[in-house]
Image: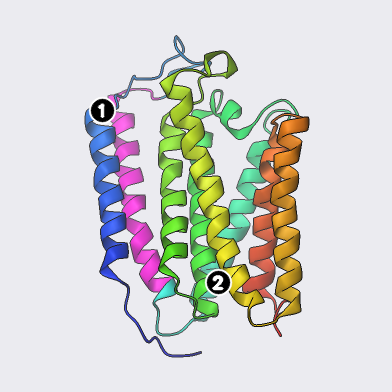
Amino acid sequence: MEKQTTKMPRALQYLWWGMTVAYTAWMCVWMRWDTYTPENTLLEREMYADKTVYLFWVAGSVLLMIAYPILLEKLLYAKQQTKTQKLFCLGTLLAGCAYITAYGFLKSPIEYTASMMGLYYPWLFKGWAIFAGLSVFTNVMYLYRKYEYRNIVGVVCTSIGCAALFVTVNIPSAGEELVPTLQCLAHWSSALVFAVLGAAGIIMLLVHQCRTKNKKYLAATVVFVAILLLMLVLLVTVGKNGLIENLPMWAMYLLLALTNFTTLLDQ
């Protein structure tokens, strides 16, 4: 593997520190352990059993956010890629794919999206965000390092996209009958940030590889973008459901598996 030629930019450290501080302040000052109860959502029980449980979640999620820039430095700015990194990223990829798939079938995926299921399984929905965010982030950064692609715009997009999930799972969907509410808009917009910026981070790498005249990557780019467009068409024509929602995630996992752990798309 090629030697590292640059260090992790301080701007990326500041980005993650800033998002972590903002998240911590938001959870400790603005949010409350009993903010969302069965009276104003569809939850079958309170989001948190008591204040102590809530504080443990806040502490755990903050520690997880602190881990992201550490993973960024270890994966993207490592001197070389190691077998340990490969196994770690493969593990997060398999765990992420398995979790979101199993979660998506807790109820009928034709009738329920991940957010709607989160109204019944709030803690499992938090797990969905943890597994989805970590698996996408670690594998995209591993892929960037594989091709010595350190586009800071792509890293920032992926970082902000994964961080947005912490907002999504802490503000549950208000249900379709409460669409105009700030709660619902905050939930949907943060989920959209993850979807758009997460996809953007991968597409930037795909376009970069297409410039090397690798026809395999050109085909992969066309297929991946086509799947994203298909999802949009289905959302408009059919309406949202769990299967349509998971379609780009499954495509992303397949693409990352092929690029990171096989030589199928190599020249």
Residue 262 visible at all: yes
132 inside magenta stretch: no
Q: Which residues are magenta?
A: 48-75
Q: Position of residue 70 (x, y in %)?
A: 34, 65
Q: Quadrant of the C terminus?
A: bottom right
Residue, far top: 39
Residue 116 is drawn in which quadrant? top right
Q: Secondary structure at mark 1?
A: helix
- Residue under the image location 26 percent in, 43 percent down: 22
Tag 1 or tag 2, which sits nearer the N-term? 1
Q: Secondary structure at mark 2?
A: helix
The dominant secondary structure in magenta is helix
- Residue under the image location 72 percent in, 32 percent down: 236
58 inside magenta stretch: yes
In the picture, the disc for residue 264 is none
Q: The residue under label 2 is which amino acid type? A: Leu
Q: How crowded is the residue under tag 2: few (<14 C-alpha within 10 Å), some, or many (20+)? A: many
- Residue under the image location 51 percent in, 89 percent down: 1
Q: How crowded is the residue under tag 1: few (<14 C-alpha within 10 Å), some, or many (20+)? A: few
- Residue under the image location 55 percent in, 29 percent down: 118
Q: The residue under label 1 is which amino acid type? A: Trp
Q: Nearer the viewer, residue 153 or 195?
A: 153
What residue would you read off at disc 1?
30
Q: CA distance from mark 2 to mark 1?
A: 37 Å
What residue would you read off at disc 2?
143
Q: Nearer the viewer, residue 187 or 91?
A: 187
Q: Position of residue 16 (x, y in %)?
A: 31, 56
Residue 113 is drawn in which quadrant? top right
**Is 117 drawn above or below residue 12 in the view shown?**
above
